[in-house]
Image (cartoon, rainbow, N blue to C red):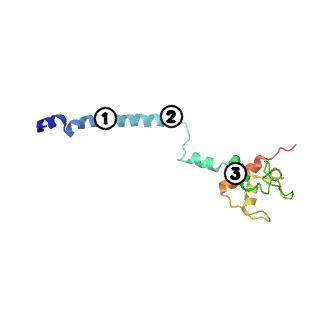
Amino acid sequence: MSDQTISRRVRPIKHYAPVAARLLAIAAAACAVTSLANAQSNEQEPVQEPGAIQAIQAKKPDPENGRAVARALCTNCHMIGDQPNSAVNADVPSFVAIANIHDQSAERISNWLLNAHGPMPNVHLTRKELGDVAAYIMSLRQPKP
């Protein structure tokens, strides 16, 4: 190919500059319109920090997860609402009995589990697991007649 053929096929960069400038202007205008529309539609909604919803949901106890933790760790000694994995000691209260103690609360259960007690092994649970197990136990509470 000759130099003249190449120069006809390849356009200089300055030829594309006006097209690029127009595309950039269109993109900027589209972003501005989208931002304005989002701002107007969100005026009625409360402003929340990023991750606030996830943080609230993470703090909320999950009784189903508590049930899974209890099935993994507690069924050797306690009747947790399901059939026990093995014979349980009659002196060990069931989770239903624990839930129905007068003035029982999830906080009291969590605090009790934080400390080692007699024959009960000192299980190391995360704060989330503690809250979940306590919520599960309290979900077994029977209404008073």
Q: Quadrant of residue 29?
A: top left
* Front: mark 2 or 3: 3
- Per the image, label 3 sits on a secondary structure element best described as helix
Amino acid type at circle 3 is Asp
Q: Which mark is residue 34?
A: none
In screen coordinates, is 48 left or right of 72?
left
- The answer to whether the residues at label 3 and label 1 have Cβ atoms under 8 Å apart is no
Quadrant where the image shows the N terminus: top left
Q: CA distance from mark 3 to mark 1?
A: 54 Å
- Per the image, label 1 sits on a secondary structure element best described as helix
The residue depicted at 74 percent of the width and 49 percent of the height is 136
Quick one: label 1, few (<14), some, or many (20+) residues within 10 Å?
Answer: few
- Per the image, label 2 sits on a secondary structure element best described as helix
Name which of mark 2 and mark 3 comes first in the sequence. 2
Quick one: label 3, few (<14), some, or many (20+) residues within 10 Å?
Answer: many
In screen coordinates, is 123 left or right of 8?
right
* Front: mark 1 or 2: 1
Q: Quadrant of residue 126?
A: bottom right
Image spot of residue 83 (x, y percent): 80, 48
Quadrant where the image shows the C terminus: top right
Amino acid type at circle 2 is Ser
Q: Which mark is residue 132?
A: 3
Q: CA distance from mark 2 to mark 3?
A: 37 Å
- Residue that numbered label 2 is attached to: 41
Image spot of residue 84 (x, y percent): 79, 51
Q: Which mark is residue 23?
A: 1
Amino acid type at circle 1 is Leu
Name which of mark 1 and mark 2 comes first in the sequence. 1
Q: CA distance from mark 1 to mark 2?
A: 27 Å
* Front: mark 3 or 1: 3
